[in-house]
Image (cartoon, grey):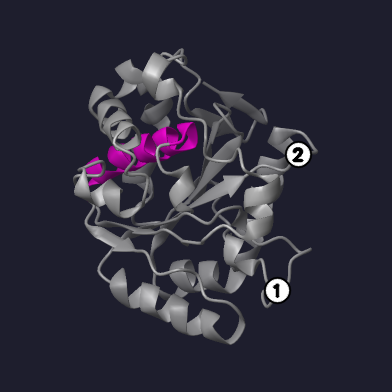
Amino acid sequence: MQNRYVGDIGDFSKYFLLRELSQSGFKIGLNWYFTEPTEKELKYNGGDGKHTDYLIYDKYNIRNADPELFDHLRTLVVKDKRIISSVAELGILPHINNFFAEPVELRNERESWFNRSLATLKECDVVFCDPDNGIIPKSVLPISSNANKYILLSELHQLYSTENKSVIIYQHTARTGKIEQQITSKINEVEKVLSIQNKNLVQVLYTGLGTSRFYIAIKQPSHSVVINNIINKTPQKCSGLKLLGLFNRITSKIDF
């Protein structure tokens, strides 16, 4: 996550989901996986994070899905408070009080950084991880200079299997390949890494508004029923808007 993405159209779907999950009764924490943009990113991807006109004209018709969230984000953008600390200050996530905002460290400092995040979010039942790009692919080494844009497989394993947290991960889609195939591939990878046999423990919500992305929910068995109900109902609360769609593993289709 970068400050320049705060208030972007993708932020709306993320906070909409988190606000729904915060009604679960579980304590939810957010690891921003915060990064600063490089000079190269600013030069070649200068348009990233500029999808905010939806807040002025409501061109996607999404205000009715959550008017309070919409108005908070509009205030944030209009007042030029596009920094992650504003999310807590403006009450965008009123029932979530546990945030870890330290910039992602690289190489030898990465493990210490992650351990500090675990300490900060220790009391949380569910941890939302918000890396720039999602789960680290095989093409990127954990010690590489751009590994800060990903959650490492070792970190996912520690959160889920050692700390017994339910985990939700932001995942950016690649420019090539069908969306449904990318989702299926990530689900299979997560289940393999975490040795998950129960197919009901992993769900995916997708949004194509602005830029294409999806959220991977990996549930602890004891959390599954409650989180399941919320995730299944979330698309219904924004029906017709294509804000969030639930991936159907049987049909390999996204149901809005």
Q: In the rendered image of this protein, does residue 240 appear above or below residue 151?
A: above
Q: Which residue is mark 1?
A: 144
The x and y percentages for residue 34 are 46, 61
* Residue sitting at x 56%, y 28%: 210
How dense is the environment of label 2, judged by Cα within 10 Å: few (below 14), some, or many (20 and up)?
Answer: few
Q: Is residue 195 visible?
A: no
- Mark 1 element type: loop
Q: Give residue 175's mark.
A: 2
| Quarter assignment of residue 20 | top left
Q: Inspect the image, locate mark 2, and give the three-letter code of the amino acid beneath it.
A: Arg
Q: Is residue 105 visible?
A: yes
* Residue sitting at x 37%, y 64%: 101
| Residue bounds of the magenta highlight | 8-25
Give 204 or 57, whichever is nearer the viewer: 57
Residue 10 lies in the magenta stretch: yes
Q: How would you classify the magenta stretch by its main secondary structure?
A: helix
